[in-house]
Structure formats: C-alpha cells, structure tokens
Image (cartoon, rainbow, N blue to C red):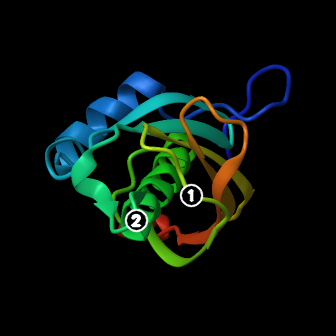
Amino acid sequence: MSMAENTTGTPKLAMTTAQLSEYLDEIFPQLRTNGPPVHIEHVEPYKARLRMEFMESELRPGGTLSGPTMFKLADVSFYCCLLAMIGPVPLAVTTNMNINFLRKPRQSDLVAEVHILKLGKRLAVGEVFLYSDGSDEPVAHVTGTYSVPPPEQR
C-alpha cells in the first residue's frame, strides 16, 4: 500500500478528523450509544488522540475503570488511526492486542494517544497509551496489530 505524500514527502491522511467521525457515526453508531461515548479529538499521519467520556457504570469494584472499558478505547483508537491513514476500510480487524495496566485510573475521562509504528500492505503495528484526563502518567500501555484486507476485499 503506497501512502499518498505531500510536497514535503510526509504521508498524507486519507481521512480527516471530521470525515472519520462522520464515517464512524455511519458504520459504528454504537460508539456513541452503547456505553461511554468515544470522540476523536485529533488525527495526524500515524497518530491520533481520542477521548472516552467517564461514566460511573464503567467502574468495577474498587472504584476503578474496568479493563474491558480501557481495552475498548485502545482498540477503537487504533482502528481510527489506521482508517485515517488508509481510508474507509471497514474490514480492517484486530489480530492481536496486549494491554498492560500500569496504575489505577482516575474517575475522569479516559484519553488515548495512539501511534502506528509500522503500516505495511497487510499488517499495521502500533501502540496506545491511555491516560486519565489531566494526568501525564499513563494508566495503561497497549500494543497491537491490525490486519488490512487486500484491495480486492475492500
């Protein structure tokens, strides 16, 4: 997969933040209706920042955000960053994801910062750091791989 480049030689986004948000509303409306809403704050080549609104219903015993809630944000963030790079490819899917919980998150919005480390023709590898809103200390570190379908299956 060749990425389009601008005149400075840096990769160009296939989808802007606004286009990506609109596309996700169309194909993945449950991001805003089932559980805490997820919002795309910013995308740039190989990077994205998303936010999940805090909801008390996502707390587990002990007053911390549940692991599945944190995993959801990490997975969605990677997906969004990938689509921003390759365009609307709904069949790009997670093939592997590993999460390390580093500290107890605050009862606040959860922020994800994703970075795609390698974007190949069939696989994308990246990492996501999750933060409690307003904190510089990550609450989780996630690594993952996405499968990108060949052009004839898109």
Amino acid type, residue under disc 1 in the picture: Lys
Question: For the view shown, which residue lies furthest in the front direction?
Answer: 62
Name the residue that disc number 1 marks: 104
Amino acid type, residue under disc 2 in the picture: Gly
Q: CA distance from mark 1 to mark 2?
A: 10 Å
**For residue 102, which quarter of the picture?**
bottom right
Q: Nearer the viewer, mark 1 or mark 2?
A: 2
Tell me whether the residue at label 1 lies in contact with that at label 2, contact meaning CB atoms closer than 8 angstroms.
yes
**Of 85 and 137, which appears nearest the observer?**
137
**Of 54 and 48, which appears nearest the observer?**
54
- Asked whether the viewer can see residue 110, the reply is yes
Work out whether 102 lies above or below 46.
below
Question: For the view shown, which residue lies furthest in the right direction?
Answer: 8
Name the residue that disc number 2 marks: 62
Work out whether 100 lies above or below 136.
below
Mark 2 is surrounded, within 10 Å at the Cα level, by few (under 14), some (14 to 19) or many (20 or more) other residues, namely few
Residue 121 in the image: x percent, y percent? Answer: 64, 66
Residue 67 in the image: x percent, y percent? Answer: 43, 69
Residue 94 in the image: x percent, y percent? Answer: 47, 72
In the image: residue 59, left or right of residue 131: left
**Of 124 and 96, which appears nearest the observer?**
96
Residue 10 in the image: x percent, y percent? Answer: 80, 31
How many labels, in total?
A: 2
Work out whether 147 lies above or below 90.
below
Q: Going 26% across and 48% down the picture, which residue do you hit?
A: 56
In the image: residue 32, left or right of residue 116: left
Give the quarter of the figure containing the C terminus: bottom left
In the image: residue 34, left or right of residue 52: left
Q: Going 34% across and 32% down the picture, which residue do you hit?
A: 21
